[in-house]
Amino acid sequence: MAEVAASMMPPPVPKELERPPLVLNQRSLGWISDHIAGIAEGKAPLWWWLAFVPSFLMFLLLIAMLAYQISTGVGVWGNHHPTMWGWDIINFVWWIGIGHAGTLISAILFLLRQRWRTAVNRAAEAMTIFAVMCAGIYPAVHVGRVWFDWYLFPIPNANGIWPQFRSPLMWDVFAVSTYFTVSVLFWYMGLIPDLAVMRDRARTRFRQIVYGLLALGWTGANRHWTNYEKAYLILAGLSTPLVLSVHSIVSLDFAVSQLPGWHTTIFPPYFVAGAIFSGFGMVLTLLVPLRKLCRLEDVITMRHIDVMCKVTLATGSIVGYAYAMEFFIAWYSGSPYERFAFLNRALGPYWWGYWLMLICNVAVPQLFWFRRVRQNLWLVFVISILVNIGMWFERFVIIVISLHREFLPANWGYYMPTWVDVATFLGTFGLFFTMFLLFMRFLPMIAISEVKGVTPQADPHHPLGGAKLHGGAAS
Amino acid sequence: MNESAKSFGVLAEFATPADLMHAAEKVRDAGYQRWDVYTPFPVHGMDHAMGLKNSKVGWFAFLGGLTGYTTGMLMIWYMNAHDYPIVVGGKPMFSPFSAFPPSYELTILLGAFGALGGMLILNRLPRWHHPLLKHPRFINRGASHDKFFLVIEASDPKYDERAVKEFLAALGGRNIEVVEE
């Protein structure tokens, strides 16, 4: 009997190949609940208020800037001929790109069976939703007369005319609104078992009722889990093509036009890689301080930080390849306009923007080849912020530099943002951080039930989960 | 206590996921039908141990996706080629290529609603009242925290309170209690 059991055991893993566990210090299932749910219970710590008050003030600034812009007109922004898209569309693309890492973590890494995702997917999905909220503001207000935004919906206008679906801008409306809705559904579905945790832990009547309503009566029955897991798998399967399509469609807003610098077929994959790159930058910017402040080092381990740095390195290198390929095609196409557009990026009046982009997006992430850099949280944090800055400048390069000098020199100009542009952009940070801080105060910022599921004591085939290694029935 | 109509079923606690799974295999083989296990996370292999068939959620998602794609294509054809055709840049009034991106997004949108809605319908949720959710042992650091429960419900045709209690005790269940409806 013992020999048979020994032959069924997997061969021992060499020490160098052993992976550190996903939850350190052999924390118990109960510890995971207590520790993660505890962040959203009790009094808010001082640092939370120190972060929340300025965020909320910046959010108020956003409201004021939008009110000023809507009541006065788009002229308060720097957009003018020939640069009719400026910070508004830069910020739209930037924010929506940030969202993509959340969906990558929650959907694509789920399909790829990357079990480490459980520690970061909830916060990353929340980041997605709030980033898409910030993004969505810009297309809605940049039209100038926001009261005509309903022209974008499939409703006939007063003359019985329908929206025109041969334009990528209409595709964008469907892509972004679907992206937001499906991200919320996916996030909420992941939250249901954890809302049940919060409901069962709630002390006050008010919290019991609110979490109870939101948890939909979840009991943790296995007949429910089986449908739940299937639905979760399908949502992951649907979100994967969704996230790839959203930034592809955003890129088609540019690529379908005929402007040199925009009219290229490389745009969809290049935009998607850049989006995931920038999103991972933001995930690291958020989670490196939060794991310290919330004492989550045992759940978001150095291994998690390490793999996220590697994803950043990989996507950053894809982006670098795309930059090189754009230049190659500009030369190889033989089109003088195309060649001019790219030389103008590197050597024209906005040369500083182009080189800032190259340094932040291509050169700096290469530091992640070094293990010592990936293990140094200060460096990781600084690099993640540089990635965010670099990706903002990528959109600046694509939009402003392409627009400011097109075919006819009579159409040339120099674009400068106004203080309203800057204050509105700062305001979107206020919205983002206000929402994120509220999220982590009231909802579990890590998927409790999923993290429990990747511990060894949750595995019925592991000794810690109660498995008898001699394989027989319970003795 | 005789078999009152007021009891929901018998609750038993198990120490580890493996113990619960072995108990579930025995309950399945004993031919019970109205029973379930309650865990803080989905236990790998439990569906097989309980003898559950593949979930039907996929059909809901498929129907949602199909509806979405058809709606998108028909909507765009109706709006741009049938009800109010306008020539734009010499492009065809309707082309499956330009209509594809919005239809694709609607496929995903309604497919996602189908998946979530299908899960809720198959699970009979939302349900804000459940006998187990009133039971202190079940909710206070219980099934959502780190405990593993098995419940055989009173509505099962084979249900006999004393026999069920003895059966669950023989399987290694602890803290065996009758849950009130």
Image (cartoon, coloured by chain):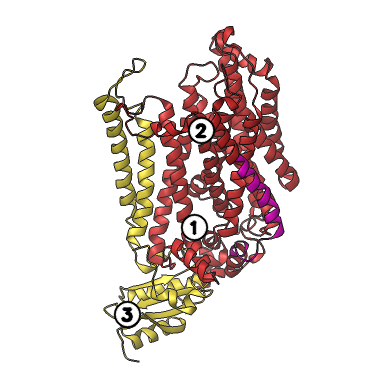
The residues bearing labels 2 and 3 have C-alpha atoms spaced at a distance of 59 Å
In this picture, which residue range is highlighted in magenta?
Answer: A37-62
Q: Residues within 10 Å of mark 3 (few under 14, many from 20)?
A: many
Q: Residues within 10 Å of mark 1 (few under 14, many from 20)?
A: many
Q: Is any atom of residue A370 visible in this view? A: no
Determine the residue located farthest toward the front in the rendered image.
Answer: A71
How far across and down, in percent of the image, does residue A266 sit?
51, 24
Is A209 magenta? The answer is: no
Mark 1 lies on residue: A191
How far across and down, in percent of the image, does residue A191 sit?
49, 57
Say if labels 3 and 1 share a chain. no
How far across and down, in percent of the image, does residue A50 sit?
71, 53
Mark 3 lies on residue: B154
Q: Secondary structure at mark 3?
A: loop
At 54% from the left edge and 15% from the top edge, which residue is drawn? Answer: A260
Q: Residues within 10 Å of mark 2 (few under 14, many from 20)?
A: some
Question: Residue under mark 1: which chain is it in?
Answer: A
Q: Disc 2 marks which amino acid?
A: Val
Is A51 magenta? The answer is: yes
The residues bearing labels 1 and 2 have C-alpha atoms spaced at a distance of 32 Å
The image quadrant of residue B167 is: bottom left
Q: Secondary structure at mark 1?
A: helix
Say if labels 2 and 3 share a chain. no
The image quadrant of residue B10 is: bottom left
Q: Disc 3 marks which amino acid?
A: Ala
- Compared across the picture, whether A91 is left or right of B25 comes to right
Q: Disc 1 marks which amino acid?
A: Leu
Q: Identify the colour of chain A in the image.
A: red
Q: Secondary structure at mark 2?
A: helix
User: Which sits earlier in the primary sequence, circle 1 or circle 2?
Assistant: 2
Determine the residue located farthest toward the left in the rendered image.
Answer: B82
Tell me the number on the disc at residue A141: 2
